[in-house]
Image (cartoon, helix red, strand yellow):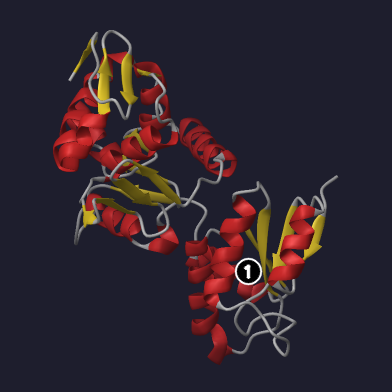
Protein backbone atom coordinates (compact mmCIF):
# COMPACT_ATOMS: atom_id res chain seq x y z
CA UNK A 1 0.00 0.00 0.00
CA UNK A 2 1.20 3.52 -0.85
CA UNK A 3 0.24 6.79 0.81
CA UNK A 4 -0.93 9.58 -1.53
CA UNK A 5 -1.32 12.95 0.19
CA UNK A 6 -2.74 16.32 -0.96
CA UNK A 7 -0.44 19.35 -0.96
CA UNK A 8 -2.36 22.62 -1.25
CA UNK A 9 0.62 24.71 -0.14
CA UNK A 10 4.38 24.41 0.24
CA UNK A 11 3.96 24.00 3.99
CA UNK A 12 1.46 21.16 3.46
CA UNK A 13 3.84 19.57 0.94
CA UNK A 14 6.74 19.54 3.40
CA UNK A 15 4.50 18.15 6.14
CA UNK A 16 3.24 15.36 3.85
CA UNK A 17 6.76 14.36 2.78
CA UNK A 18 8.12 14.45 6.32
CA UNK A 19 5.16 12.34 7.48
CA UNK A 20 6.08 9.57 5.06
CA UNK A 21 3.93 10.16 1.97
CA UNK A 22 4.96 8.07 -1.03
CA UNK A 23 3.41 10.60 -3.44
CA UNK A 24 1.66 13.97 -3.32
CA UNK A 25 -0.87 15.61 -5.61
CA UNK A 26 -1.04 19.35 -6.22
CA UNK A 27 -2.00 21.88 -8.86
CA UNK A 28 -0.82 25.00 -10.59
CA UNK A 29 -2.46 27.16 -13.20
CA UNK A 30 -6.19 27.28 -13.87
CA UNK A 31 -7.03 23.66 -14.64
CA UNK A 32 -7.68 22.08 -11.26
CA UNK A 33 -10.57 21.97 -8.82
CA UNK A 34 -8.82 24.49 -6.56
CA UNK A 35 -8.71 27.16 -9.28
CA UNK A 36 -10.40 29.61 -6.89
CA UNK A 37 -7.80 28.97 -4.18
CA UNK A 38 -4.16 30.02 -4.01
CA UNK A 39 -2.21 27.52 -6.10
CA UNK A 40 1.49 27.06 -6.69
CA UNK A 41 3.18 29.46 -9.09
CA UNK A 42 5.31 27.91 -11.85
CA UNK A 43 8.48 28.61 -9.85
CA UNK A 44 7.03 27.20 -6.62
CA UNK A 45 5.76 24.10 -8.40
CA UNK A 46 9.16 23.41 -10.02
CA UNK A 47 10.85 23.83 -6.64
CA UNK A 48 8.30 21.50 -5.03
CA UNK A 49 8.94 18.80 -7.65
CA UNK A 50 12.70 19.01 -7.00
CA UNK A 51 12.10 18.86 -3.23
CA UNK A 52 9.99 15.71 -3.58
CA UNK A 53 12.20 13.89 -6.08
CA UNK A 54 15.31 14.44 -4.00
CA UNK A 55 13.48 12.56 -1.22
CA UNK A 56 12.10 9.79 -3.40
CA UNK A 57 8.52 11.11 -3.39
CA UNK A 58 6.48 11.20 -6.62
CA UNK A 59 4.47 14.22 -7.73
CA UNK A 60 1.03 14.06 -9.38
CA UNK A 61 -0.37 17.15 -11.09
CA UNK A 62 -4.12 17.72 -10.74
CA UNK A 63 -5.82 18.84 -13.95
CA UNK A 64 -9.25 17.77 -12.76
CA UNK A 65 -11.65 20.20 -14.41
CA UNK A 66 -13.84 19.98 -17.50
CA UNK A 67 -12.44 21.97 -20.41
CA UNK A 68 -13.97 24.02 -23.19
CA UNK A 69 -12.52 23.94 -26.71
CA UNK A 70 -11.09 27.43 -26.17
CA UNK A 71 -9.00 26.17 -23.24
CA UNK A 72 -7.28 23.27 -25.04
CA UNK A 73 -4.20 25.20 -26.19
CA UNK A 74 -3.60 26.61 -22.73
CA UNK A 75 -4.10 23.17 -21.17
CA UNK A 76 -1.55 21.69 -23.59
CA UNK A 77 0.92 24.40 -22.56
CA UNK A 78 0.35 23.49 -18.90
CA UNK A 79 1.04 19.84 -19.69
CA UNK A 80 4.29 20.74 -21.46
CA UNK A 81 5.41 22.82 -18.48
CA UNK A 82 4.55 20.00 -16.09
CA UNK A 83 6.48 17.48 -18.16
CA UNK A 84 9.51 19.77 -18.28
CA UNK A 85 9.37 20.11 -14.48
CA UNK A 86 9.45 16.33 -14.10
CA UNK A 87 5.90 15.56 -12.96
CA UNK A 88 5.38 11.80 -12.53
CA UNK A 89 1.68 11.62 -13.43
CA UNK A 90 -1.39 13.75 -14.16
CA UNK A 91 -4.80 13.33 -12.49
CA UNK A 92 -7.61 14.24 -14.91
CA UNK A 93 -11.40 14.32 -14.94
CA UNK A 94 -11.95 15.21 -18.60
CA UNK A 95 -11.36 12.29 -21.01
CA UNK A 96 -10.50 14.82 -23.69
CA UNK A 97 -7.70 16.09 -21.47
CA UNK A 98 -6.39 12.54 -21.13
CA UNK A 99 -6.18 12.28 -24.92
CA UNK A 100 -4.52 15.70 -25.08
CA UNK A 101 -1.95 14.62 -22.48
CA UNK A 102 -1.03 11.55 -24.50
CA UNK A 103 -0.66 13.60 -27.68
CA UNK A 104 1.27 16.44 -26.02
CA UNK A 105 3.72 14.37 -23.99
CA UNK A 106 3.98 10.85 -25.48
CA UNK A 107 5.24 7.84 -23.51
CA UNK A 108 7.48 6.76 -26.39
CA UNK A 109 8.53 7.97 -29.86
CA UNK A 110 9.17 5.55 -32.75
CA UNK A 111 11.29 7.49 -35.23
CA UNK A 112 12.38 6.49 -38.72
CA UNK A 113 15.74 7.80 -39.88
CA UNK A 114 14.83 8.29 -43.54
CA UNK A 115 11.89 10.70 -43.79
CA UNK A 116 10.79 12.70 -46.85
CA UNK A 117 11.46 16.26 -45.60
CA UNK A 118 14.24 15.83 -43.03
CA UNK A 119 16.13 12.95 -41.47
CA UNK A 120 15.26 11.43 -38.14
CA UNK A 121 18.50 12.65 -36.54
CA UNK A 122 17.34 16.27 -36.90
CA UNK A 123 13.98 15.48 -35.33
CA UNK A 124 15.69 13.55 -32.53
CA UNK A 125 17.91 16.56 -31.89
CA UNK A 126 14.87 18.81 -31.47
CA UNK A 127 13.23 16.29 -29.15
CA UNK A 128 16.32 16.28 -26.94
CA UNK A 129 16.62 20.07 -26.99
CA UNK A 130 12.96 20.63 -26.01
CA UNK A 131 12.31 20.49 -22.27
CA UNK A 132 8.93 18.74 -22.55
CA UNK A 133 10.30 15.85 -24.66
CA UNK A 134 13.90 15.71 -23.43
CA UNK A 135 13.38 12.55 -21.40
CA UNK A 136 10.81 10.84 -23.66
CA UNK A 137 12.25 7.48 -24.80
CA UNK A 138 13.01 7.21 -28.54
CA UNK A 139 13.49 4.08 -30.63
CA UNK A 140 14.95 4.69 -34.08
CA UNK A 141 14.00 2.33 -36.91
CA UNK A 142 15.87 2.26 -40.21
CA UNK A 143 17.16 0.17 -43.06
CA UNK A 144 20.66 1.55 -42.38
CA UNK A 145 22.41 -1.29 -40.61
CA UNK A 146 26.07 -0.25 -40.48
CA UNK A 147 27.81 0.15 -37.13
CA UNK A 148 28.40 3.84 -37.86
CA UNK A 149 24.67 4.45 -38.36
CA UNK A 150 23.79 2.65 -35.12
CA UNK A 151 26.41 4.60 -33.15
CA UNK A 152 25.22 7.85 -34.73
CA UNK A 153 21.65 7.22 -33.64
CA UNK A 154 22.63 6.31 -30.08
CA UNK A 155 25.00 9.28 -29.82
CA UNK A 156 22.20 11.63 -30.87
CA UNK A 157 20.16 10.41 -27.92
CA UNK A 158 18.14 7.42 -29.12
CA UNK A 159 17.34 4.85 -26.43
CA UNK A 160 17.38 1.95 -28.88
CA UNK A 161 18.04 1.33 -32.57
CA UNK A 162 16.06 -1.24 -34.55
CA UNK A 163 17.21 -2.30 -38.02
CA UNK A 164 14.75 -3.26 -40.75
CA UNK A 165 13.46 -5.80 -41.46
CA UNK A 166 12.37 -6.86 -37.99
CA UNK A 167 9.66 -9.12 -36.60
CA UNK A 168 6.66 -7.78 -34.71
CA UNK A 169 7.58 -9.81 -31.59
CA UNK A 170 11.05 -8.26 -31.49
CA UNK A 171 9.54 -4.81 -31.97
CA UNK A 172 7.09 -5.29 -29.08
CA UNK A 173 9.87 -6.66 -26.88
CA UNK A 174 12.10 -3.63 -27.58
CA UNK A 175 9.25 -1.21 -26.84
CA UNK A 176 8.47 -2.94 -23.53
CA UNK A 177 12.15 -2.92 -22.54
CA UNK A 178 12.60 0.80 -23.27
CA UNK A 179 9.39 1.72 -21.42
CA UNK A 180 10.46 -0.44 -18.49
CA UNK A 181 13.83 1.29 -18.25
CA UNK A 182 12.17 4.71 -18.48
CA UNK A 183 9.66 3.92 -15.73
CA UNK A 184 12.31 2.64 -13.32
CA UNK A 185 14.91 5.36 -13.96
CA UNK A 186 15.64 7.13 -10.64
CA UNK A 187 15.10 10.87 -10.35
CA UNK A 188 18.45 12.63 -10.40
CA UNK A 189 19.71 15.69 -8.62
CA UNK A 190 19.06 18.69 -10.82
CA UNK A 191 22.50 20.29 -10.39
CA UNK A 192 25.79 18.41 -10.19
CA UNK A 193 29.13 20.08 -9.44
CA UNK A 194 32.73 18.96 -9.37
CA UNK A 195 35.56 21.45 -9.20
CA UNK A 196 34.93 24.07 -11.87
CA UNK A 197 32.33 21.91 -13.66
CA UNK A 198 28.60 22.57 -13.16
CA UNK A 199 25.88 20.49 -14.82
CA UNK A 200 22.28 21.74 -14.67
CA UNK A 201 19.96 18.85 -15.49
CA UNK A 202 16.85 21.04 -15.77
CA UNK A 203 18.34 23.52 -18.25
CA UNK A 204 20.55 20.71 -19.61
CA UNK A 205 23.61 22.94 -19.61
CA UNK A 206 27.25 22.45 -18.68
CA UNK A 207 29.59 25.23 -17.63
CA UNK A 208 33.26 25.41 -16.67
CA UNK A 209 34.17 28.45 -14.56
CA UNK A 210 30.78 29.85 -15.55
CA UNK A 211 31.48 29.54 -19.29
CA UNK A 212 29.06 27.37 -21.31
CA UNK A 213 30.35 24.14 -22.86
CA UNK A 214 28.53 22.58 -25.82
CA UNK A 215 28.28 18.79 -25.57
CA UNK A 216 26.60 16.13 -27.67
CA UNK A 217 23.87 14.02 -26.07
CA UNK A 218 26.23 11.14 -25.28
CA UNK A 219 29.02 13.41 -24.05
CA UNK A 220 26.48 14.99 -21.70
CA UNK A 221 25.30 11.56 -20.50
CA UNK A 222 28.87 10.42 -19.94
CA UNK A 223 29.77 13.54 -17.95
CA UNK A 224 26.54 13.16 -15.95
CA UNK A 225 27.54 9.59 -15.04
CA UNK A 226 31.01 10.70 -13.95
CA UNK A 227 29.56 13.52 -11.83
CA UNK A 228 27.17 11.09 -10.13
CA UNK A 229 30.14 8.94 -9.06
CA UNK A 230 33.04 11.26 -8.12
CA UNK A 231 36.27 9.71 -6.82
CA UNK A 232 34.98 6.28 -7.81
CA UNK A 233 36.70 3.93 -10.24
CA UNK A 234 34.18 3.13 -12.97
CA UNK A 235 34.83 -0.04 -14.93
CA UNK A 236 34.33 0.01 -18.67
CA UNK A 237 31.53 -2.54 -18.39
CA UNK A 238 29.66 -0.27 -15.98
CA UNK A 239 30.09 2.79 -18.19
CA UNK A 240 28.91 0.94 -21.30
CA UNK A 241 25.82 -0.30 -19.46
CA UNK A 242 24.94 3.06 -17.91
CA UNK A 243 25.57 5.35 -20.89
CA UNK A 244 25.17 3.11 -23.94
CA UNK A 245 22.93 0.44 -22.39
CA UNK A 246 25.02 -2.44 -23.71
CA UNK A 247 27.36 -5.03 -22.24
CA UNK A 248 29.32 -5.38 -25.49
CA UNK A 249 32.90 -4.47 -24.60
CA UNK A 250 33.84 -4.80 -28.27
CA UNK A 251 32.39 -1.29 -28.50
CA UNK A 252 34.43 0.00 -25.54
CA UNK A 253 36.67 2.03 -27.85
CA UNK A 254 33.63 4.27 -28.18
CA UNK A 255 34.18 5.23 -24.53
CA UNK A 256 37.77 6.26 -25.22
CA UNK A 257 36.71 8.42 -28.15
CA UNK A 258 34.02 10.19 -26.14
CA UNK A 259 36.25 10.67 -23.09
CA UNK A 260 38.98 12.18 -25.28
CA UNK A 261 36.52 14.64 -26.83
CA UNK A 262 34.93 15.40 -23.46
CA UNK A 263 38.32 16.23 -21.92
CA UNK A 264 39.11 18.59 -24.77
CA UNK A 265 35.79 20.42 -24.49
CA UNK A 266 36.10 20.81 -20.71
CA UNK A 267 39.56 22.35 -21.04
CA UNK A 268 41.59 22.35 -17.82
CA UNK A 269 38.63 20.84 -15.96
CA UNK A 270 38.88 17.77 -18.20
CA UNK A 271 42.11 16.77 -16.43
CA UNK A 272 39.90 15.48 -13.61
CA UNK A 273 38.84 12.54 -15.80
CA UNK A 274 41.55 9.96 -15.16
CA UNK A 275 42.16 6.78 -17.08
CA UNK A 276 42.59 3.84 -14.70
CA UNK A 277 44.78 1.43 -16.62
CA UNK A 278 43.10 -1.87 -17.60
CA UNK A 279 39.97 -0.94 -15.63
CA UNK A 280 38.18 2.20 -16.77
CA UNK A 281 37.96 5.82 -15.64
CA UNK A 282 37.64 7.94 -12.51
CA UNK A 283 36.61 11.56 -11.91
CA UNK A 284 39.16 12.73 -9.36
CA UNK A 285 40.19 16.05 -7.83
CA UNK A 286 43.78 14.75 -7.85
CA UNK A 287 43.79 14.52 -11.63
CA UNK A 288 46.06 12.04 -13.36
CA UNK A 289 47.83 9.88 -10.78
CA UNK A 290 50.73 7.47 -10.86
CA UNK A 291 49.73 4.17 -12.36
CA UNK A 292 47.06 5.82 -14.49
CA UNK A 293 47.15 7.11 -18.05
CA UNK A 294 45.99 10.56 -19.10
Q: Give the residue at x 39% y 34%.
A: 225
The C terminus - image quarter:
top left
Specify the farthest residue to the right. 1
Q: Give the residue at x 26% y 30%.
A: 272
Query: Residue 214's spot in the image, x, y percent?
Result: 20, 51
Q: Give the residue at x 31% y 41%.
A: 195
The image quadrant of residue 16 is: bottom right
Looking at the image, which is closer to me, 121 or 62? 62
Q: Does residue 142 appear in the picture of this structure?
A: no
- Secondary structure beneath dot 1 equals helix
Specify the farthest residue to the front. 286
In the displayed structure, would residue 163 be above or below residue 13? above
The number of numbered badges drawn on the structure is: 1
Looking at the image, which is closer to me, 153 or 52? 52
Query: Residue 276's spot in the image, x, y percent?
Result: 29, 14
The N terminus - image quarter:
top right
The image quadrant of residue 238 is: top left
Residue that numbered label 1 is attached to: 98
Looking at the image, which is closer to me, 29 or 249? 29
Q: Is residue 212 left or right of residue 102?
A: left
Q: Give the residue at x 48% y 69%.
A: 80
Q: Does residue 205 appear in the picture of this structure?
A: yes
In the displayed structure, would residue 109 be above or below residue 185? below
Query: Residue 144's spot in the image, x, y percent?
Result: 22, 35
Neighbour tally class for label 1: few under 14, some 14-19, many 20 plus, Cα within 10 Å: some
In the displayed structure, would residue 104 be above or below residue 33? above
The image quadrant of residue 30 is: bottom right
Query: Residue 184's spot in the image, x, y percent?
Result: 59, 39
Amino acid sequence: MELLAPAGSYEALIAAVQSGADAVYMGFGAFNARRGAKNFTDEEFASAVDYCHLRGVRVFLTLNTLLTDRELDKAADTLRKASAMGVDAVLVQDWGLLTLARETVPDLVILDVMLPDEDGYQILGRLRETAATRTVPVIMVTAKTSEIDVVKGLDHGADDYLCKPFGIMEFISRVKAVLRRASTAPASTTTLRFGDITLDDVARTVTVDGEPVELTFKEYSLLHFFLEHPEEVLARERIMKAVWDTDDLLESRTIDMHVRTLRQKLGHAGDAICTVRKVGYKLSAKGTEAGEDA
